[in-house]
Image: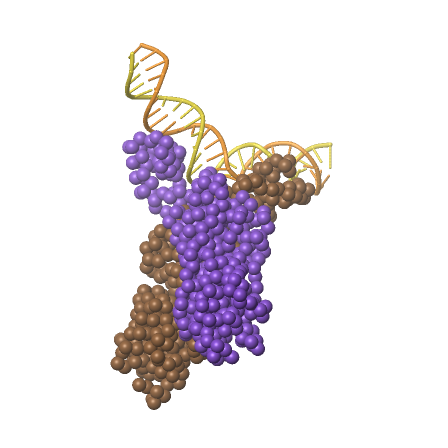
Chain colours: A brown, B purple, C yellow, D orange
Amino acid sequence: MRIGNSRVTATEVARKAGVSQPTVSLVLSRNPKARVAPATRARVLKIAQELGYRPNRLAQGLVRRRSYALGVIVPGFDNPVYAAVISGAEKVAAQAGYAVLLCEAKGSEVVQHLEALRDRQIDGVIIAGIAASTLPAAALDGLNVVLVNQPSEKFSTVGSDSLKAGTIAAEHLLSLGHRRLAFLGPADAIPAFRLRERGFVTALRGSGVSLPSEFLHRAAATVAGGLAGMRALLALSERPTAVFCANDLMALGAHKACSVAGVGLPRDLSLLGCDDIEMAQLVTPELSTISLPARELGARAVRLLLKQIDADGALPPASQLLAVKLVVRGTMGQHTPAQSR
Amino acid sequence: MRIGNSRVTATEVARKAGVSQPTVSLVLSRNPKARVAPATRARVLKIAQELGYRPNRLAQGLVRRRSYALGVIVPGFDNPVYAAVISGAEKVAAQAGYAVLLCEAKGSEVVQHLEALRDRQIDGVIIAGIAASTLPAAALDGLNVVLVNQPSEKFSTVGSDSLKAGTIAAEHLLSLGHRRLAFLGPADAIPAFRLRERGFVTALRGSGVSLPSEFLHRAAATVAGGLAGMRALLALSERPTAVFCANDLMALGAHKACSVAGVGLPRDLSLLGCDDIEMAQLVTPELSTISLPARELGARAVRLLLKQIDADGALPPASQLLAVKLVVRGTMGQHTPAQSR
DNA sequence: ACAAAATGCCAATACCTATTATCACATCGC
DNA sequence: GCGATGTGATAATAGGTATTGGCATTTTGT
């Protein structure tokens, strides 16, 4: 029974049930050490049910010093990977009775969003795609934090094995016979991307293959960036025979650039992405990529965060690293000397 | 100055400034009818600044009976259109000091999420991609609601002209000479999709072109659904020469199905989507589609919602309809009799 | 039967802010 | 010099819940 926006309060339930407000609270909070007679309990529950009573979570939050709300900050929704992370996070959070306050922010906006989240007394925050090290230390001070896909000493993290992703990319392309390999990465220092790069470069070096500076191209971590980047690589007098992109959006842009330039995949060039977003399967030939459990990342981030919250910040930072997997589709091919131009 | 999670309260500011808590509140709430001496005001502001005081929004919400939070409910993040709507909504909301509580829900889950949002005293809710008519009336009772992309008598709405989209699709394909047109739509009764369908079908009828039942195919509103749907259409003894899809995800699935089946776009078949998601430009040939301002939809939805909230629900439902635009790319072609199979 | 223990409920209070009504004081008009 | 007006701050209270301590009442133990 609700009229307009006004809601039934515990006091009203109490009055109708002939008890005091605290008793209602005791019945509903299921506190084990609270002793309340079975008959009273039943009566209160019945009335509460009838009136459709639901506790006001603002009031609850005020007194419990807990809002049962989490912040989630991502740099943008245009990347399906973040959408998947959010989806996984929201699901677990909702099941646990937590709300998700979503923020889209880059650069210095992040700090303001964090302050706004603090004002709302969030119990914790999940940050994906934004380097925590670029934030002023005070911004995260005293907050329960879980970082997604970036290593950290100071905060808990949940990530996919980005370094390994780079290694896998290099090793697989090398095994196909490629020796002129390029990396297409983002201009911003996004931790996961840097690790993919490092893994790739390190594996190349380890195999005695050099990566000339013009084969390490930086652009925005978007489709447009990948497009421009690949265009630049194709303009080189000595083209690479294989390109590894820091993420699938860039790879799809690169894919497009090849298609426009008449460069045949995988005949003339091998292309490898990272993330395994749905769209990778829609282009022709289908994009080979390195798969990563984005939804699971979001889900685990929330579980870890909730654990920290329950421990009241007394837990040391924990880290989880999930495995990545090479997904071979249609954009990678054997390299034979005859093939080079 | 913050220690751990504990925050500076108005009372502490008051004590340090040698005034009472209400005075601090008066100074900071900038109430025009509140009279406070300039000197006092300056002192309070200075101390508040020094201590880094920020009002607790839970407490504020409790007494003001307003949480400055909005709910946003979408059926899934896998569709980039919703991501864009959310992005537009979040930006405007944040600028106005409102938080966005994000929910991913379909079917009956929606009701539970709405209840959870009520418990948090949200000031209003935006619903996209979920038919309000399928919800029990009580679920939205007494809430400030703005629906995205679905018409309604009862609630305010912000939408793109879905009916027109269908009409445009039909007219353009007809003008290209097509007479055997098919529609690929979702199985669920999602309002926007239904309108696109109706506009399409009506325009066909108006031109004396019939739409046989096997040319009206229903499947899930996803890539997989579009793929399966197109496969079914291609299996017909009399294939359509042009297919209009309810959204781009389905169209991309259909695109893929054609590519797999060796059906040349646009030589053997013309394909038209709706939404204009980024990925439409990544497939080859690029997907022709009908563009719709998804971000703007989200932004306007919030603006409208805020207006309603400020009016305290005393406003009659308002509706905004934004224009859609045909974007001609590579998947539509002229139909000549010689081309038919 | 009586002290001791357990039970069941409530009064009081805290959480933090916003708002209304009120009070003390100064100023002003005449 | 005195009522009237205005100013600047505060006391009191509300908003809805959770929690502690305590008070009656009943039950238990011997």
Q: Position of residue A120 (x, y in %)?
A: 43, 47
Frontmost residue, A57 versus B12: A57
Frontmost residue, B84 versus B204: B204
Q: Position of residue A105 (x, y in %)?
A: 37, 56
Identify the residue at image location x=37%, y=49%: B95
Identify the residue at image location x=43%, y=73%: B333
Please state if B206 lies on the left or on the right of A168 as rendered. Answer: right
* A254 in relation to A48, above or below: below
Residue that lies at the very extreme toward the bottom in this rendered image: A338
Please state if B312 lies on the left or on the right of B14 as rendered. Answer: right
Q: Position of residue A312 (x, y in %)?
A: 47, 52
**Displayed quadrant of residue C17:** top left
Frontmost residue, B106 versus A14: B106
Q: Is residue B40 visible?
A: yes
Q: Position of residue A51 (x, y in %)?
A: 62, 42
Identify the residue at image location x=31%, y=42%: B50
Q: Is residue A175 visible?
A: no
Identify the residue at image location x=37%, y=85%: A335
